[in-house]
Image: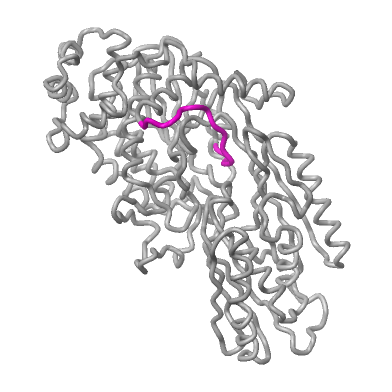
């Protein structure tokens, strides 16, 4: 298996072989017929709830009282005697359950301490940012408390190791940085306001920026490493946890690390979805810029857009989009927009979900706010993007607009995107049978160097190249500018897709862990997200997003479900032991 993407000519066959692995795991990665599975694990959890001893050996002995078949395993574990391969699997599975039952509150507390550090990129270089530095110090304290080895690689990557008895190691990769927030959007349906940087439990949900992307995973895997260390069970491979600090903003930290530190040959990334991700779309940013000053004299009676805003970052579908519109007769403008809004919502909410429009009069005009549904930028289908709806409303509400950069930006969004996010209006739509469709969503609007800049988040599947897609989008935008007489500057940076073909025990082990723990189908999948798996040799993503659920990373009101946290605790712990002791990875 190569670190580079598969050649396009062999990619389909390669992914077919990956899919086949779901049903034919190798014997070294497959659970024996007598292995404990979800029904038995749930029963043990119910029996042990509220009486879980701190010692894993004591927990095993207690479980064996109800399940005599486990008595030999409990006895050999207590005496530190060698275990058979089947017994080692059972021990790893039960250690995961023990960790989940014993340490849920501790993992939530560690997650809370991490969420409290707003590790959002600022004008300060990340490796000099006090919040990133504080995060590294926090990880260092936790590692010391847990008896794990810690190394700070120049505030770029924070490394934690649990040594194994052999010479091999495998990597676990996560990231500490988070995307920006619009704090005013963090409001629950009942009106409760949340602090994005305070982990808040409401029922079975843990709200906070980074709770699922990626701080919850960092806390969980640190506690899993401690559980493995404290268990006394043998570990052949060293576990190396690498915590990146610039994953959300370009990945220069992991590249810095790679230049100075040899990477593990095999790596598991905890930054995407279950069961196991073997293909990722490429992430791109399509930027169009317009002169912010009026292009022509303002016509009598025209309104002027003086501000426009969408997401806080390009890789998020915004929760709200806003515009400030100036007019000589503010009351008339407010009345016309208010009258047009209800019909507009009725007409367009059938095209992708419910949204609202608020018209707030001002002394010199109005403030407009369109509220949709936020989503990760890679999953526009899970949200309702308010920015193109705001642009379309401004263009069709019957209010003449002064021809400035903001008005041109709204026309650009309407003409080349509309309410579609599949590239249809540009004539660039295509899809891959495994990786899904191209998506392109306008998300970020900002004034930059005297220009209004609109950024669209692009996710490119197999079936195209970054160079060809970038050339095509820029040509479409320039052609549009020429046809409309609008001066537009355009640039498109596009990352490539990745399709891997991992074979053998390590993939089948991950699939087995997921399937037996959750009772859900376990087969390799692709993702629209783009992670540092692309930069690592032999890398597979394993969680934390569950199939069939909305992925709340980059969303307003980002949350982690407690039941999913429990599953992570159980699966990550089993994963560390089983991958750490595989006779061979392939």
Tell me which corner region of the image, top left, top right, bottom left or bottom right, holds residue 220. top left
- Relative placement, left or right, of 511 versus 52 is right
| Frontmost residue, 34 versus 402 | 34
Q: How many marks?
A: 0
- Relative placement, left or right, of 150 versus 374 is left
- The magenta segment: 518-531
| Frontmost residue, 515 versus 274 | 515
Does residue 291 appear in the picture of this structure?
yes
The structure residue drawn at horizontal position 44% and vertical position 51%, both measured from the top left corner, is: 119
- Relative placement, left or right, of 483 versus 33 is right
Residue 322 placed where, x, y %?
Answer: 58, 71
Is 529 colored magenta in this rendering? yes
| Frontmost residue, 542 versus 298 | 542
- Relative placement, left or right, of 151 versus 438 is left
The structure residue drawn at horizontal position 36% and vertical position 33%, both measured from the top left corner, is: 221
Residue 27 placed where, x, y %?
Answer: 43, 10
């Amino acid at each position: 298996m190569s670190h580079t993407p598969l050649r396009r000519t062999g990619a389909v066959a390669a992914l077919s072989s990956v899919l086949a692995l779901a049903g034919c795991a190798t014997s070294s990665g497959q659970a024996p017929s007598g292995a404990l599975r979800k029904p038995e694990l749930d029963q043990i959890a119910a029996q042990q709830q509220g009486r879980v001893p701190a010692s894993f050996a004591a927990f095993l002995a207690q479980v064996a009282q109800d399940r005599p078949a486990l008595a030999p395993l409990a006895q050999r574990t207590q005496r530190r005697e060698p275990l058979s391969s089947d017994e080692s699997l059972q021990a790893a599975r039960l250690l995961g359950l023990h960790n989940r039952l014993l340490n849920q509150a501790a993992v939530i507390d560690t997650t809370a301490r991490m969420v409290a550090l707003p590790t959002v990129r600022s004008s300060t270089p990340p490796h000099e940012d006090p919040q990133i530095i504080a995060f590294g110090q926090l990880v260092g304290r936790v590692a010391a408390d847990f008896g794990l080895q810690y190394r700070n690689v120049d505030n770029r990557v924070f490394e934690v190791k649990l040594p194994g008895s052999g010479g091999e190691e495998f990597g676990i990769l996560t990231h500490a940085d988070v995307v920006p927030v619009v704090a005013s959007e963090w409001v629950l349906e009942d009106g409760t306001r949340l602090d994005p940087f305070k982990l808040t439990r409401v029922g079975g949900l843990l709200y906070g920026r980074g709770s699922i992307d990626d701080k919850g995973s960092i806390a969980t895997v640190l506690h899993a490493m401690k559980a493995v260390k404290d268990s006394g069970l043998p570990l052949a491979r060293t576990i190396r946890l690498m915590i990146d600090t610039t994953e959300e903003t370009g990945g220069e930290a992991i590249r810095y690390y790679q230049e100075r530190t040899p990477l593990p040959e095999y790596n598991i990334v905890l930054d995407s979805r279950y069961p196991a991700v073997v293909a990722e779309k490429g992430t791109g940013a399509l930027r169009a810029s317009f002169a912010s000053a009026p292009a022509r004299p303002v016509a009598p009676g025209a309104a002027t857009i003086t501000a426009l805003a969408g997401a806080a970052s390009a890789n998020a579908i915004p929760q709200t989009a806003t515009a400030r519109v100036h007019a000589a007769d503010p009351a008339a403008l407010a009345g016309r927009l208010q009258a047009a809004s209800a019909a507009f919502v009725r007409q367009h909410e059938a095209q992708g979900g419910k949204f609202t429009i608020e018209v707030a009069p001002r002394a010199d005009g109005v403030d407009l706010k369109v509220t949709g549904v936020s989503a990760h930028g890679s999953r526009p289908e899970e949200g309702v993007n308010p920015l193109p709806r705001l642009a379309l409303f401004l263009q069709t509400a019957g209010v003449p607009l002064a021809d400035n950069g903001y008005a041109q930006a709204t026309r650009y969004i309407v003409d080349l995107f509309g309410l579609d996010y599949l590239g249809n209006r540009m004539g660039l739509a295509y899809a891959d049978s495994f990786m899904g469709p191209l998506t392109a969503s306008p998300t970020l609007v900002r004034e930059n160097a005297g220009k209004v800049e609109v950024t669209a988040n692009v996710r490119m599947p197999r079936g195209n190249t970054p160079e060809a897609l970038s050339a095509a989008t820029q040509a479409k935008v320039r052609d549009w500018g020429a046809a409309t007489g609008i001066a537009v500057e355009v640039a498109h940076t596009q990352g490539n897709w990745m399709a891997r073909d991992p074979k053998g025990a390590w993939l089948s082990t991950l699939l087995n862990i997921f399937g037996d723990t959750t009772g859900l189908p376990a087969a390799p999948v692709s993702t629209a997200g783009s992670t540092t798996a692309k930069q690592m040799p032999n890398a597979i993503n394993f969680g934390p997003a569950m199939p069939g659920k909305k992925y709340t990373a980059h969303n307003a009101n980002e949350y982690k479900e407690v039941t999913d946290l429990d599953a992570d605790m159980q699966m990550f712990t089993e994963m560390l032991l089983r991958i750490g002791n595989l006779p061979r990875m392939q």
